[in-house]
Amino acid sequence: MDTLKSTVSVVCISDTHNSTPIVPPGDILIHAGDLTERGTPDELRSAVQWVASLPHPVKIVVAGNHDKSLDKKFCDRELLNHCEIDWAAAGIIYLEHSATEITVRQRSFTVFGSPFTPEYGNWAFQYPQAKLLPARAHEVWASIPSQADILRIRDVRPILHVFGHVHGGRGVETLRWDPAAKASRWMTSKLLSKILSPRQLFPGRGIPPGGRGHSLLVNASIQSGQRGAALNEPVIVDI
């Protein structure tokens, strides 16, 4: 990441499951998976059309386990129709265990996105749990670029890690990395209350980012953990 001081606003959402919530403006939009509920081609096309309509200059999408028809291997196995999306025409960057370099406000970021989750049930983009096939699980994550700024956690230690999947875990947490630890041991420096929204905790501004000494973890699930409850708000991070 460049060291220029201009602030870049990252709007984080996940687990919309066919809903189309109000999304505040920002420089970068990240949808961290589960655009749909059943993952049918019709659902996906509608979700992509909605994301494409949003005003953010940079829009990044990662699939989730519900987005079945984006997973070609899953579709071939289950005899389902694979959905071909022209992401470039929609003005969206789609990351499927891949990285991209983006430049916003004269600042450059490397973003890595992956749809994979440990196997549980018959869903898309799954890999065997580490306790069953440790080598295969390690292989999935071994290709993550170490210079990435926005991606997964642990060895890379990004400034921002955006995810979802577990609706009830929605929230924001800052991790400070212990440089003296031989393993990737970390100390929690701040756990934001799930009762308050990020805007209440940081009134009038976005959440401050992480850095190489610490990482900001954002579970941006729009769906709440309770059936029928109101949708959560997007999380805004100012980098």
Image (cartoon, rainbow, N blue to C red):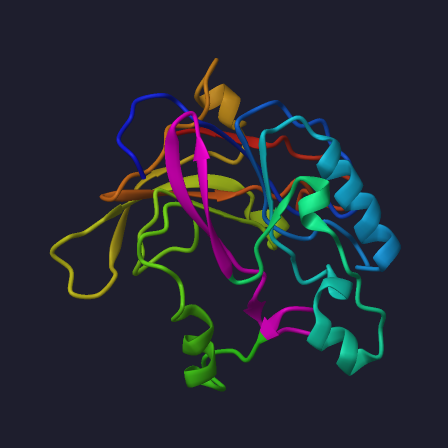
Q: Residue at point 63% right, 73% down?
A: 120
Q: Is residue 91 magenta?
A: no
In x, y percent, where is residue 93?
60, 46
Q: Is residue 7 above or below residue 159?
A: above
How many marks the image carries: the answer is 0
Q: Quadrant of residue 228?
A: top right
Q: Residue at point 44% right, 20% down?
A: 202
Q: Looking at the rendering, in which quadrant would you find the N terminus?
A: top left
Q: Which residues are magenta?
A: 98-126
Residue situated furthest front in the rendering: 89
Residue situated furthest top in the rendering: 204
From the viewer's perspective, is 182 left or right of 185?
Answer: left
From the viewer's perspective, is 217 left or right of 58?
Answer: left
Q: Is residue 67 visible?
A: yes
From the viewer's perspective, is 162 left or right of 138?
Answer: right
Q: Is residue 120 magenta?
A: yes
Q: Residue at point 42% right, 84% down?
A: 135
From the viewer's perspective, is 76 left or right of 28?
Answer: right
Residue situated furthest right in the rendering: 42
Q: Nearer the viewer, residue 31 or 93?
A: 93
